[in-house]
C-alpha cells in the first residue's frame, strides 16, 4: 500500500553522493554506511520492504543536527530522523535514500523542575529512561505507547497509549520544543509555561509532523506527581457492547480512570493459552485508578457497580501493587501472546479511533469482517479514547494474503472515517496511511501541503511521509 | 503601544468601496454602516483608540461567511471576525478598515453527544448559553474566561480562565473546527475523536490564531460530567510567597484542584471596601475542588494542612453550594471592586504567565515596580497555571500617564519573558502585544509569518494582529 507512494520518489544520486562524502568527513566514525546499520535504520515494522538510507549519522548535539541539515539542504538530500525505530507506519523508511539522522545519543536529561512539574530533555531520551531518572523525585511522565520509544519520536508521531484517557497524549504533554528547521535554523516554539496565547501554536504543529517540518532537538514536557495510591483490576463482560457501555458511563460519571483497556474474545483466547491465566474466552476490561487511598477504593467500587449494571463482572480489583501486577499481567502479555495463534506469521499492527459511542459498532463490524475474510487479528483497545488496535497475523511472503489484508485495512480505515473517526489514533500517517488522509480530511490536506511547502520548499525533511508534495 | 503598528497599515480605499457596495446588496439589512454600530465593532478594551470597520456584516451561516470572504478576497479588503467583542488586546479593531464579520447570529447548538462527552456548536454560541443548554444533561463546558465570550472567539484567542488548572484551556478542549480559509474554502480540521495522529494539527494552528488564518464557523468541544460534589473555600497567607508555595505543593501532591486563585493585598483592600466582607488586607487563595463527596472533603482537608504548614490559614471551606458562593463572592466581585480605588479611572487589563516556581518573584517584583512607578493595579492570578492579571487604573486622557503605563507594561512583559514566561497567558497578542512576540520567541516568529503568508497571501484576514507580514 505504501509501496507505490514510496517507489514514486526519485533519488537525487548526485546530491546524495556529495552529501555522503561531506558527512563522512565531518562525522568520522559517527557516519556509518554499512549495510546492516543502514537497513536497521530503514526497517519498517510493516510488510513494506525496508528502504534503507545511504548513510546513518549519530548526532550528539543540536549544532550537529544543524550541520547535517545545512549539508543536506545544500545538496537537496533527504533527512529521516530516527529515535528508536519503533514507529509503526514506515516513518523511518528512506524511500528516496539520503540520511538517517540517529538522535539516540542525544539522551541527556537537561533539567527537572519539580516545582513546575516539568522537565527539559533531549530527543533521544526514552520514556523509561526518563521515568527511571525521575523515580526519586516522586514525579513521573505518564505517556506510554508500549514500546520504550524515544521522547523525540513520541512527540514527532503524536504518540499516546494506555494512560491517555487520564493524562492526554503527546499533544497535551509537550510544553515547548526546540527544533532545527529545514533552513538550518534552531527555533524555540514556546516558553516553559503551562499555558500561553502568544501567536501560532508551533509546538503542536511540530507534534505529529513526523519529521516532515523540522527535527526536534529538545523537549519541555509536563510531569505529574506519582499517585499516592493505585488500584486496578479486571472485569469480564458478556459482549463488547456491554464493556463499551460501562466505559461510557464510567467516564460520564467523572470517575477519573487512569487506564481502561478492552481485550476482545480472540485476544483473551490467545492470552489464556499463552499466560495460563484463569480467565474465560470473552471480552474483558482491564482498569486502573490513580488517586488517594480512599479515592481509588471508591472509584473501583463505583466502577464495579456500573459494570454489574451492564451485565459484567465479577470485577476483581486490588490496591496492592503485586496483586495488581498479577491481575494486569494478561494485558501486558497481550503483545507476545498473539504470535502463537499462527506460528510463523508476522504481526502487523494497525489502529483506528472513533467516537466512543461508535466503538462497539466499529469493533463488531471489524470482527465480522475478519471472520468473513478469514484473517486472524486480535483486538486490544484504549477504549476510554475510542481507540483500538489490531495485530494482523500475516504470511508476509504471500502476495494474495497481503492483498487481502490491504483490502481489509482499507475497509477498516473507511469504516472508522464513516463513523466520524480517524484512520490513525496513535500510529501516525507515515507511508502506510497516506492514502487515507485525504479521505479523512479532504481539502484541509491542501493547507497541510501549503505549510509543508513553505517551510520545507526542497522537500528534504522525511519526504514520502504524511503528504505527497 | 499598539498604535504605531495600527496606523502603519494602509487602507485600500478602492477595494473597500467596491466590497462595501457588493456586501450591502448581498446582505441587505444585515449589512450595517451606521457609525455607532461600526464603532462598537471596533471597540477595544484598551486605551488604543477605536479603529472602526467600514461595514458590519451579520452572517448566519458558513456559506454566508464564504461569500463575505470571497467578496473581500476579490477586492483585497480586510475581514475582522467578531464574536462578543470581549477580547482584550485589540483583536477586533480594524486598523485598515474593511469588514467586521459579526458571527453572533451563528448561535445554534448543533449536537450534544452525551456518550462521547462532546458537542458541536456554531461560533456565536456563548459559554453561558452552552452551559444553560447543557444543564439538564449532567454535562458542562468548563472554560471560563470571565466574560460571557463567544466560543468561536474563545477558540480564536486560545482563552482559558479560572478552571484551566484542572480542565486545560481552549487548546485542550477543542476537538475539531470548521473554518473558512482566505481562499473561501470551508475546511474541517479533524474528525470528532478524542485523539488522532492524522497529519498536521490544523485544529491547534487555528486555535489562538486570532482570525488571522481563517474564520471559525463550527467547533467540536469536549464536555465534562458535572462533578458530584464541589467544595470551596478561602485562605489567607502571610505573603504571596507562602501562597505560591502552597499552590506548588498542592499540585505536586496530585490534589486535583479545579480552581486556585490568588488575590493580592491591594486587591483584597479593594474587596474589603467594596463587598464589606470580613477579610484582612493580606494575600488570599480562593480554592475549589471537584469530585465525589468524600473526595472533595479529603482534598479540602489536605489543602488546609499544606496551607497551615506554609503559615497560611485558617482555611474556611464548605461543600454547601450557598456557603461556597458566599465565600467565593469576594473573588467574583474582584472586577467591580477595582474601579472605586480610583474614581473616574479606566481599568486596563493585562496578563503574563511564568513557570509557577517564578510566580512569587514575578508578582513581588511587579508589586515593587508599581509602588515605585506610582501606578495602581491590583493583582489576581490563576496561580495554578502561573498566570496573573493586573488591572491598571489609568486616566486614559493623560498622555504622560499612558507613557508611564506603557513603560511599566514593557517591563512586566520582559520580566515574565526573562523568567521563562510568556507576555500573554490568555489574552492573545492582538495589536497590543505584537512588539513582545519577537522578544519572546525570536526566529520562530519567522515561521509563523511564513505560514500566515502562504495561507493568506493577500493579508485579508484580520491584518495588523499578531504579526507584521
Image: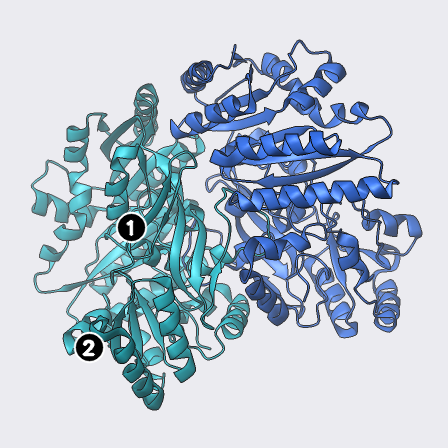
Chain colours: A blue, B cyan
* In the depicted structure, whether residue B55 falls above or below residue A254: below
| Lower sequence index among marks 1 and 2 | 1
Nearer the observer: mark 1 or 2; the answer is 1
Q: Tag 1, which chain?
A: B
- The furthest residue to the bottom: B14
Between A137 and A282, the one nearer to me in the picture: A282
Q: Would residue A166 be found to the left or right of residue B15 on screen?
A: right
Task: Identify the residue at image location x=56%, y=46%.
Answer: A417
Task: Identify the residue at image location x=25%, y=36%.
Answer: B135
Task: Say the numbered circle drawn on residue B252.
Answer: none
The image shows residue A144 at horizontal and vertical percentages of 61, 35
Task: Say the numbered circle drawn on residue B145.
Answer: 1
Q: Is residue B371 visible?
A: yes
Q: Tag 2, which chain?
A: B
Q: Would residue A255 be found to the left or right of residue A151 on screen?
A: left
Q: Residues within 10 Å of mark 2 (few under 14, many from 20)?
A: few
Give the residue number, with chain letter if any, for mark 2.
Answer: B399
Task: Identify the residue at image location x=10%, y=35%.
Answer: B278
Locate residue B357: give its quadrant: top left
Q: Would residue B47 be found to the left or right of residue A162 on screen?
A: left
The image shows residue A386 at horizontal and vertical percentages of 53, 36
Between B58 and B37, the one nearer to me in the picture: B58
Cα distance, mark 1 to mark 2? 30 Å
- The furthest residue to the front: A372
Q: Secondary structure at mark 1?
A: loop
The image shows residue A137 at horizontal and vertical percentages of 55, 32
Amino acid at each position: 500500500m505504501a509501496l507505490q507512494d514510496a517507489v514514486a520518489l526519485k533519488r537525487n544520486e548526485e546530491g546524495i553522493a556529495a552529501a555522503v562524502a561531506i558527512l563522512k568527513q565531518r562525522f568520522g566514525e559517527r557516519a556509518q554506511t554499512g549495510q546492516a546499520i543502514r537497513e536497521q535504520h530503514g526497517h519498517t515494522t510493516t510488510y513494506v520492504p525496508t528502504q534503507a538510507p545511504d548513510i546513518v549519522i549519530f548526532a550528539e548535539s543540536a549544532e550537529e543536527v544543524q550541520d547535517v541539515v545545512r549539508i543536506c539542504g545544500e545538496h537537496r538530500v533527504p533527512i529521516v530522523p530516527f529515535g528508536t525505530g519503533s514507529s509503526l507506519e514506515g516513518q523511518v523508511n528512506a524511500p528516496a535514500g539520503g540520511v538517517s539522522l540517529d538522535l539516540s545519543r542525544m539522551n541527556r536529561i537537561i533539567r527537572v523542575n519539580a516545582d513546575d512539574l516539568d522537565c527539559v530533555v533531549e530527543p533521544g531520551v526514552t520514556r523509561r529512561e526518563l521515568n527511571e531518572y525521575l523515580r526519586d523525585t516522586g514525579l513521573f511522565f505518564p505517556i506510554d505507547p508500549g514500546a520504550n520509544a524515544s521522547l523525540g519520536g513520541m512527540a514527532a508521531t503524536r504518540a499516546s497509549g494506555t494512560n491517555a484517557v487520564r493524562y492526554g497524549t503527546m499533544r497535551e504533554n509537550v510544553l515547548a520544543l526546540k527544533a532545527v528547521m529545514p533552513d538550518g535554523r534552531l527555533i524555540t516554539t514556546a516558553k516553559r509555561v503551562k499555558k500561553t496565547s502568544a501567536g501560532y501554536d508551533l509546538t503542536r504543529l511540530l507534534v505529529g509532523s513526523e519529521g516532515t517540518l523540522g527535527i526536534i532537538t529538545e523537549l519541555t514536557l509536563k510531569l505529574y506527581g506519582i499517585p499516592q495510591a493505585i488500584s486496578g483490576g479486571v472485569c469480564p463482560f458478556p459482549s463488547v457492547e456491554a464493556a463499551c457501555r460501562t466505559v461510557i458511563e464510567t467516564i460520564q460519571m467523572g470517575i477519573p480512570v487512569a487506564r481502561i483497556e478492552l481485550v476482545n474474545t480472540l485476544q483473551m483466547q490467545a492470552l489464556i493459552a499463552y499466560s495460563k491465566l484463569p480467565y474465560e474466552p470473552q471480552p474483558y476490561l482491564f482498569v486502573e485508578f490513580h488517586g488517594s487511598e480512599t479515592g481509588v477504593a471508591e472509584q473501583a467500587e463505583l466502577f464495579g457497580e456500573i459494570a454489574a449494571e451492564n451485565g459484567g463482572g465479577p470485577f476483581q480489583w486490588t490496591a496492592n501493587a503485586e496483586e495488581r501486577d498479577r491481575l494486569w499481567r494478561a494485558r501486558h502479555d497481550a503483545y507476545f501472546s498473539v504470535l502463537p495463534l499462527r506460528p510463523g506469521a508476522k504481526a502487523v499492527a494497525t489502529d483506528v479511533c472513533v467516537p466512543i459511542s461508535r466503538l462497539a459498532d466499529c469493533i463488531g463490524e471489524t470482527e465480522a469482517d475478519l471472520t468473513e475474510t478469514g484473517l486472524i487479528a486480535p483486538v486490544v483497545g484504549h477504549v476510554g479514547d475510542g481507540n483500538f488496535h489490531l495485530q494482523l497475523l500475516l504470511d508476509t511472503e504471500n502476495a494474495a494474503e497481503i492483498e487481502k489484508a490491504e483490502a481489509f485495512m482499507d475497509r477498516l480505515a473507511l469504516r472508522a472515517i464513516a463513523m466520524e473517526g480517524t484512520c490513525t489514533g496513535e500510529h501516525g500517517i507515515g507511508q502506510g496511511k497516506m492514502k487515507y488522509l485525504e479521505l479523512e480530511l479532504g481539502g484541509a490536506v491542501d493547507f497541510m501541503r501549503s505549510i509543508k511547502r513553505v517551510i520545507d520548499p526542497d522537500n528534504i525533511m522525511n519526504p514520502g511521509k504524511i503528504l505527497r508534495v
